[in-house]
């Protein structure tokens, strides 16, 4: 009876999500109702009273607002605007130089931000107009930035990875390390796509050097020193063992504020916007996390997670079949849900199954983040696509952006296949640390 109630709970949850009920409210409502049905109203009220504090009071969770503050300060103080210029100064001779430079710039921005949406918005404003002026297809220009923005959640610091580490009770630093390799591999895949388009379709990406467009390398490097300092400070301290993930977030936030002050970009308006956006984003993430934690407890009471793990084990499903099933689930959810909700809704079901199969939770965390980021560029709810449409409305339509991300989507599928076929891609760096 309890397992049946668990299945009913999942069904009601997805019905509420289809009705566009906010993810957090849907999770809390189903969890409260399910526990009340099984154990009574008093235990359900007890879970609702205790779960928010036990989740929010987690020391690890304090890294979330710190890394968010670092990213928002860097964004509003315009510390990252020189990344595109520096990339052009280094890469202006290569085919598709502007598109390649935009991917490099997205990777650099990701290292101080951790948000796909912020990466796409920031780089889109800077790079798309310049690519269109240089004769690039608006569709390809927008597609490169929309896809490049997904690197924001793969290269640390990543808010998705922090939340995953908390729920999976695994090392956030190890998940970060695994994300570095996959983030760089993703960037390489995108660059290869640009090269292929530049060679095969010169009408979409003009050939030839960007004569007159390049700037002196020394000037470009002077513009990006704040980003370099933040990367060395956060990554150096985190991966050398001097900082925990939480401490690295605090150091990064303080470093971003100090760098903004040193370059003369720190003012009351920058701090006001950064703090307000940090508070609003943190609040939305925490309420979803509270709902997901309650849902996990509900499923634990029903015994559904253990039942699924035992059923899969008895069915003798192979590794490849299991991974194909998981990939399909996340790709489908990514088409209709935002990443945080999709991850937190599914982890209570998948984590016990993975533990039973002996699959590394560090590896799976990186895979999940990669799959969720693919959802950021797939229709109909590709959030990065709509961000690019908003910041470059005079250059592209929504349909053009979706068309432009198609070849990058294929590169993402190839990277995903490599991660599944060769888990060492993810686990190599964590194994060395």
Image: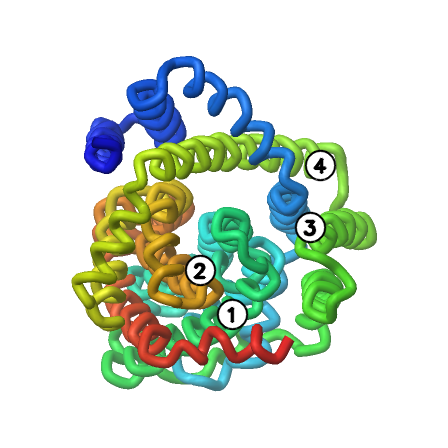
What is the residue that sits farthest to the top in this orientation?
41
The residue at which mark 3 appears reads as 246
Q: Secondary structure at mark 4?
A: helix
| Residue 222, quarter of picture | bottom right
Front position among marks 3 and 4: 3
Q: Residue at x 25, y 43 (%)?
A: 336
Sequence-wise first label, 2 or 4? 4
Q: Residue at x 35, y 24 (%)?
A: 35
Check the image and report above or below for 136 versus 94: above
Gap in Å between the C-alphas at discs 2 and 4?
A: 33 Å
Q: 10 Å neighbourhood of mark 1: few (<14), some, or many (≥20)?
A: many
Check the image and report above or below for 410 versus 355: below
| Residue 245, quarter of picture | bottom right
- Where is residue 401 shown, x and y percent of the image? 28, 55
Q: Are marks 2 and 4 in contact (CB under 8 Å)?
A: no
The residue at which mark 1 appears reads as 178
> On the picture, is 310 further left or further right than 282?
left
The residue at which mark 2 appears reads as 365
The residue at which mark 4 appears reads as 271
């Amino acid at each position: 009876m309890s397992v049946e109630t668990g299945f009913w709970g999942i069904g009601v949850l997805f019905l509420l999500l289809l009705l566009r009920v906010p993810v957090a409210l849907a999770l809390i409502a189903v969890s409260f109702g399910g526990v009340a049905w099984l154990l009574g109203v008093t235990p359900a009220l007890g879970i609702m009273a205790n779960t928010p504090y036990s989740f929010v009071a987690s020391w690890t969770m304090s890294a979330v607002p710190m890394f968010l503050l670092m990213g928002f300060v860097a964004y509003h103080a315009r510390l990252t605007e020189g990344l595109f210029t520096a990339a052009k100064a280094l890469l202006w001779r290569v085919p598709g130089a502007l598109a390649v430079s935009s991917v490099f710039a997205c990777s650099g921005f990701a290292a101080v931000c951790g948000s796909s949406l912020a990466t796409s918005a920031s780089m889109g404003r800077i790079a798309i107009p310049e690519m269109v002026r240089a004769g690039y297809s608006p569709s390809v220009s927008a597609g490169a930035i929309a896809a490049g923005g997904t690197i924001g959640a793969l290269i640390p610091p990543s808010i998705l990875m922090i939340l995953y580490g908390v729920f999976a009770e695994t090392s956030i630093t190890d998940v970060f390390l695994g994300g570095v390799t996959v983030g760089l591999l993703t960037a390489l895949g995108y660059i290869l796509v640009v090269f292929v388009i530049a060679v095969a379709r010169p009408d979409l990406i003009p050939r030839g050097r960007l004569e007159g467009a390049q700037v002196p390398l020394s000037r470009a490097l002077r513009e990006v020193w704040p980003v370099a300092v933040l990367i060395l400070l956060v990554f150096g301290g985190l991966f050398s063992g001097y900082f925990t993930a939480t401490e690295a977030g605090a150091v990064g936030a303080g470093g971003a504020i100090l760098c903004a002050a040193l370059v003369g970009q720190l003012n009351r308006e920058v701090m006001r916007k950064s703090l307000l956006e940090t508070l609003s984003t943190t609040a939305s993430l925490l309420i979803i996390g509270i709902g997901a934690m309650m849902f996990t407890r509900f499923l634990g009471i029903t015994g559904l997670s253990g039942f699924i793990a035992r059923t899969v084990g008895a069915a003798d499903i192979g590794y490849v079949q299991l991974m194909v099933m998981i990939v399909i689930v996340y790709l489908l959810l990514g088409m209709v849900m935002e990443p945080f909700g999709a991850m937190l809704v599914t982890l209570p079901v998948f984590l016990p199954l993975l533990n039973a199969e002996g699959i590394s939770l560090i590896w799976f965390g990186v895979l999940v983040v990669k799959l969720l980021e693919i959802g950021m560029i797939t229709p109909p709810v590709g959030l990065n696509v709509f961000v690019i449409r908003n910041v470059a409305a005079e250059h592209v339509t929504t349909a053009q952006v979706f068309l432009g991300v198609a070849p990058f989507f294929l590169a993402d599928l190839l990277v995903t296949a490599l991660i599944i076929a060769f888990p060492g891609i993810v686990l190599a760096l964590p194994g060395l640390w």
